[in-house]
Image (cartoon, rainbow, N blue to C red):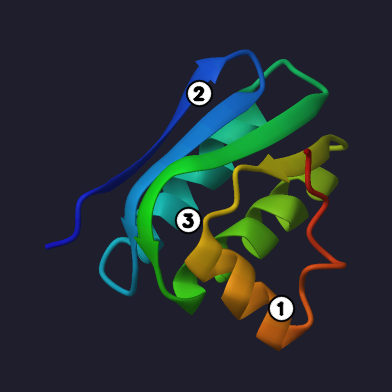
Amino acid sequence: MSQAAIREVTAGVFELAGVLDYSSGPALRKQGGSLIKATAASECVIDCTAVSKSSSVGLSLLLAYMRDASAAGKQLTVRGLPKDMREIAGVSGLLDVLPQQS
């Protein structure tokens, strides 16, 4: 079983960590959506610096979190996108879609 987690570290800042794959994705999807909806912050950041490995599931999660934030009337940005996620996003044409922080 993959070890992965999402948690709110400060208001509106969520740390996504561990291995993002088919086994961790469903729980992260549910938990992250709930956290985004529940936060009082109007601007959310998904910090991916603690992601150790990701399949395309990681990008799918980020896109789902973007939809969750939009539905809740919140802005969402991504920071610390790891190399493997960046490469998949590049091949998929998603680098322009993901709002990234420097």
- Indicate which disc, 2 or 3, sits on the residue closer to the N terminus: 2
Mark 3 residue crowding within 10 angstroms, few (<14) / some (14–19) / many (20+): some
Residue at screen point 77% across, 74% down: 94
Tag 2 residue: 8
Look at discs 2 and 3 and give the one toward the viewer: 2
In the rendered view, would you say 12 is above or below 11?
A: below
Instruction: Specify the quadrant of the image occupied by residue 90.
Output: bottom right
Residue 77: percent from left, percent from top:
77, 41
Residue type, mark 3 in image: Arg
- Indicate which disc, 1 or 2, sits on the residue closer to the N terminus: 2
Please, which residue is most extreme toward the bottom here?
A: 91
Residue type, mark 1 in image: Gly
Quarter holding the N terminus? bottom left
In the rendered view, would you say 71 is above or below 54?
A: above
Residue at screen point 38% across, 43% down: 17
Residue 42: percent from left, percent from top:
83, 23
Tag 3 residue: 29
Instruction: Specify the quadrant of the image occupied by residue 14.
Output: top right
Q: Is residue 95 visible?
A: yes
Residue at screen point 34% across, 41% down: 5
Mark 1 → mark 2, Cα distance in angstroms: 27 Å
Picture disc at residue 90? 1
Residue at screen point 78% across, 59% down: 98
Q: Secondary structure at mark 1?
A: helix
Residue type, mark 2 in image: Glu
In the rendered view, would you say 60 is above or below 73?
A: below
